[in-house]
Image: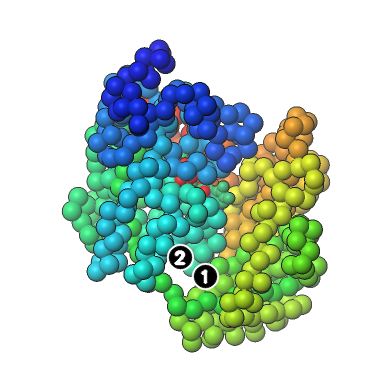
Amino acid sequence: MDVQAVKNHLLSLLGKEKVLTEKLDLMYYSYDSSFLTKMNPESPWAVVLPESTADVQQLMKYAYEHHINVVPRGAGTGETGGSVALNGGIVLDLSNFNEIVEIDQKNMQVIVRPGIVHAELNKELAKFNLFFPPDPGSSQMCTVGGMVANNASGLRAVKYGCTEQYVLGLEVVLPNGEIIYTGGIKARTIKNVSGLNLTKLMVGSEGVLGVITQIRLRCWPKPKARGIAMAVFDQLDDAPATVLEVYQAGIMPSGIEILDSSAIKAVNQYKPEIALPDAEAILLFEVDGNPPSVEYEGNVIKEVCGRRARNVEWAVDPERMSQLWEGRSVTATAAARIRPDGTRVFAGEDISVPLAKVADTLRAIRKLSEKHGVQVVNYGHIGDGNVHTAPVINPEIPEEVERANRLVHDIHLLAIELNGSTTGEHGVGAVRRQYAEIEHGNAVDYMKKVKQAFDDKGIMNPGKLF
Ligand SMILES: Cc1cc2nc3c(=O)[nH]c(=O)nc-3n(C[C@H](O)[C@H](O)[C@H](O)COP(=O)(O)OP(=O)(O)OC[C@H]3O[C@@H](n4cnc5c(N)ncnc54)[C@H](O)[C@@H]3O)c2cc1C
């Protein structure tokens, strides 16, 4: 392929305002937040910055005709190499294509372009007492298009679910430039069971089926009150057992987080003034709703936790709530600081296991960490079994990199062995595709047929998912 000819053609097609071809600009697109691309960055041939569906359509028609790979990209906060052109081609940066087309307050919906940043959208929705509940830790940076493509979620998924539960319809530009509307061309409904559910198929498709150019999202009424409980445990097994008992008491908290002893230690080392109690595990519960229901649920959580925990505290005062939550807020940063020459790598960081196996998982990860000689910090969304492990290494030392890679491979296999998944939220991208067959068996053959049906030339984000 004559890369210079591709650049020239893009410039004449879309103009220099919407096309980047300089080496320095392209370098910025050579990585996302994954360990893989930190170690192996790959610059694209060119970057296109569309401002309309027509721009995307023009690009796709050209790419299709000339068999050129196209990799959609939001903010590049993904942890899997998903938005990097690892096999050459054009990166399509959708972050400038970011309007809120309509807040349809009467129908509890919002229509947006893919580049809108999650936190910005919720700021606008709050003016109408609405919100789009999935809440990734990257909320201030990531785009809603990236969230849809990755089916992102966060610590409130336990009550509110993942992005997929809110996507009512999509506009998608297919690899050949054709445009489709999923969820009904004209529909403004919340319920719709007509036809094969292509919306669900597109959500979580990680850019391998088409480019999402418009999103119709369901919104929820914004809760009026919140409360936080912190419970401290001397036995690791008591933490998941308590989570189950809270559910059995009829309570569905909006967040349930765990810090194990490694995370507690990391937080206290990073910010001693937080002074988390030394323990095997700490659980943090968040409850939201109306003031009387929050009070009731808080009391039940306090009573249930009290059966097994060394200590429980419940707070509704905003200042005390943020103090209780602070340890969790700084965990990711604290993990990166446990050794002065180390850094946290995003690899094997996102397994999901059944609730009943969380304690076994944490114990097994500790053993693997010893076996491979790699320090780890464990925390996560225990309410839905999503365990975040932060391996901390010095990436300048190749031998440490090798050990980390062996560790995360074993963590992925462990997740599958324990009836879990290699990823609960961050997706597959390039880094977890080697596990597709082990995790899904011959269903992968049918995934590939679906891909073929949408992308017969294989130009849409190749080398990702499977
Ligand atoms: C600090 C930090 C915290 C995080 N916390 C969470 C968390 O709590 N929960 C969670 O789920 N994730 C989390 N993530 C991962 C990441 O932020 C999410 O997956 C996010 O949804 C990615 O959005 P993005 O705009 O950065 O997408 P990108 O990284 O740019 O792209 C992600 C994937 O989506 C595809 N894509 C992007 N836009 C489109 C489009 N318009 N059409 C088709 N395909 C598209 C890309 O090709 C790529 O495969 C975190 C990341 C960081 C760095």
Comparing 434 with 180, the one in front is 180
Q: Is residue 150 left or right of residue 307?
A: left
Q: Amino acid at mark 1?
A: Ser
Instruction: Give percent across and percent down for residue 413.
Output: 64, 43
Q: Quadrant of residue 102?
A: bottom left
Quadrant housing the N terminus: top left
Q: Residues within 10 Å of mark 1 (few under 14, many from 20)?
A: many
Please tell me which residue is depicted at 60% across the width and 50% down the height of the picture. 351
Q: Secondary structure at mark 1?
A: loop
Q: Position of residue 273 (x, y in %)?
A: 77, 67
Q: What's under tag 2, amino acid-wise?
A: Tyr
- Most distant residue in the left direction: 186
Indicate whether 102 appears above or below 34: below
What residue is shown with label 1?
254
Using the rendered view, name the quadrant where residue 233 is placed: bottom right
**Position of residue 448 in the picture relative to residue 234 (left or right):** left
Tag count in the figure? 2
How dense is the environment of label 2, judged by Cα within 10 Å: few (below 14), some, or many (20 and up)? many
User: Which residue lies at the image location 48% right of the left edge and 49% below the top edge?
Assistant: 142
Marks 1 & 2, CB-CB < 8 Å contact: yes
**Circle on res. 113:** none
Residue drawn where x is 22% and y is 59% of the image: 188
Asked whether 381 or 371 is in front, the reply is 381
Rounded to the nearest whole Å, what is the CA distance between mark 1 and mark 2? Answer: 7 Å
| Label 2 residue SS | helix
Residue ID for mark 2? 160
